[in-house]
Image (cartoon, rainbow, N blue to C red):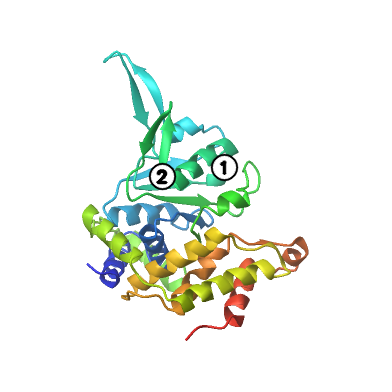
Amino acid sequence: MEGKEFIERLKKEVNKAVVGKEDVIELLAIALLSEGHVLIEGIPGVAKTTIAKAFSKAIGLKFSRIQLTPDLLPADIIGIFYYDQKTKEWTIKHGPIFANVVLADEINRAQPKTQSALLEAMQERQVTIEGVTHKLPEPFLVIATMNPLEHEGVYILPEAQLDRFMLKIEVGFPDKDEEIRLLKRKSRDEFWEVEPIVTHEELLELMRKAREVSVSDEVIEYIYALISKTRSDERLLFGASPRAGEHLLYAAKASAFLDGRDYVIPDDVKKVAPSVLSHRLLLKAEYELEGIKTKDIIREILEDTEVPV
């Protein structure tokens, strides 16, 4: 199976459970193929959990959901070492982090210690329980959700932690046609069971092919030019990190693969840049008060940067 066929079949299958959201599905696929993680921001009721569940089912992966709360401890996520009364032996009980797709619901509700445990697992792709290191399943994708409207009883994610997420996806209200289709589906109970479209081995092969997509020196220079301009923009306290450049490169390669190409073009970079960069840039207070958004700055940078031929 090639990238274009994969994404077409994936969208068709996930749309058995959700209406629309094809851009969200594609970004999730890009993160999966690039071995990155995703932060989804949206108000309650816009199908964030449904999309994550349907996505994991369609790619045939093990799914787990962690409802993050202020009293949740790191051990509740990674697991514990306990004494089994039946076997009379010390045994390790794996936590919900041991899944291929982990939905961390309302990540900003968890205390910093628990957030750090989750983000460490994301970065290292392994956890340590009582001094014993355990590898996490491959592939491993964390989809964290965040409600942008609540500011009480939450712990703001520091910029250093936000930088660990490859993509930030904003999920808003559906448009009129999508919401009417959704209501009609609900009235007729026309939702179908999502079935896997790939085997585990086929998925790993797709990930390998995405990594092998070639990138010219000109496109790499273009990526650097975009990253560099975020660092010199007077409206920003700081710009994108080197990790942001790496994530932009990997996401562009996956995007090219899903578009049926084995090489990256500038349009691939432009396509993923807002999702890769928006959560990594911090506006100065005076510009934030004027209503300027980081996505406005990213759009300006994309328009002003010379595109290689």
Q: Position of residue 36 (x, y in %)?
A: 43, 56
Inspect the image, locate mark 2, and give the three-letter code of the amino acid beneath it.
Arg
Q: Residue furthest front?
A: 217
How crowded pointer 1 is (Cα within 10 Å; few <14, some 14-19, many 20+) is rated as many
Q: In front here: 282 or 76? A: 282
180 left or right of 196 in image: right
Task: Tell me the residue at 30%/46% (across/down).
Answer: 62
Q: Distance of mark 2 from mark 1, alpha carbons?
A: 23 Å
Q: Are marks 2 and 1 in contact (CB under 8 Å)?
A: no
Q: Amino acid at mark 1?
A: Arg
Q: Which of pointers 2 and 1 lies earlier in the amino acid sequence?
A: 1
- Whether residue 20 can be seen here: no
Mark 2 element type: loop
Please give the name of the residue rendered at 35% of the width and 63% of the height, measured from the top-left corner: 211
- Between circles 2 and 1, the one closer to the viewer is 2
Looking at the rendered structure, which numbered label has been put on residue 109? Answer: 1
Nearer the observer, 76 or 215 = 215
Vertical placement of residue 19 versus 80, above or below = below
Residue at the farthest bottom position: 309
